[in-house]
Amino acid sequence: DRRAELTELLARYPEDDSPEMRYSAALLAFREEGDTARSRKLLRAAKRSNKHVLNYLVGGKTLPDEPPDFISPGRDDEASAYAAGNLRNWTETDGAIPWVRQVFKMKVLEPSKAKKRPSAVMRSARPTMA
């Protein structure tokens, strides 16, 4: 069970502040509990790990065609690498994207103003949660 594996991994490395760990913890909490004080707290902690991820999750930014050559903690390249491997987990979780928008009071993009989201993610990125 992938959820059990992720839960064990998160428990083993509670001090890991990477977007992979923080955003995955928030999504897992949302899947298990819905919109709770705990899931919101985890989502806010995820934002602190890399605020740029949010724009990829809600469709404000599109993924680059190629993965970044280097990844810098807290920067957009790290955010795009996270999103490339995990965006599908968020979009396939009922209510997750509207929840992110609600928690951070982010606007819903009108179809004419939203950038086209690529149908495939970067090949080199790997998802952390199924």
Image (tube, grey):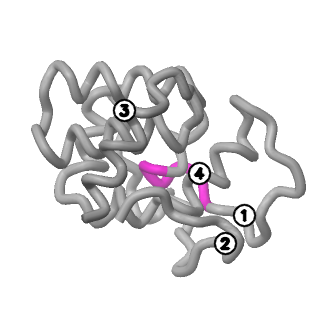
What residue sits 53% from the left and 44% below the top?
A: 20
Of labels 1 and 2, the one closer to you: 2
Question: On the image, which quarter does residue 28 sit in?
Answer: top left
| First-in-chain label (2 vs 4) | 4
- Secondary structure of the residue carrying tag 4 is helix
Q: Which mark is residue 75?
A: none
Q: Locate the N terminus by quadrant.
A: bottom left
- Indicate whether 41 appears above or below 120: above
Q: Which mark is residue 122?
A: 2
Q: Which mark is residue 82?
A: 4
Q: Nearer the viewer, residue 5 or 116?
A: 5
Name the kind of residue labelled 2 in the image. Answer: Met
Position of residue 92 relative to residue 55, above or below, is: below
Taking the magenta stretch, the answer to whether it contains residue 58 is: yes
**In whole angstroms, how far apart are the C-alphas of marks 3 and 4?**
20 Å
Upstream in the sequence, badge 3 or badge 4? 3
The label number, if any, that marks residue 64 in the structure image: 1
Q: Amino acid at mark 4?
A: Tyr
Left or right, 22 with reference to 100: right
Q: Nearer the viewer, residue 46 or 18?
A: 18
Magenta extent: 57-62
Q: Residue at horizontal 40%, vertical 37%? A: 10
Of helix, strand and loop, which one carries label 3?
helix
Q: Which residue is mark 3?
A: 11
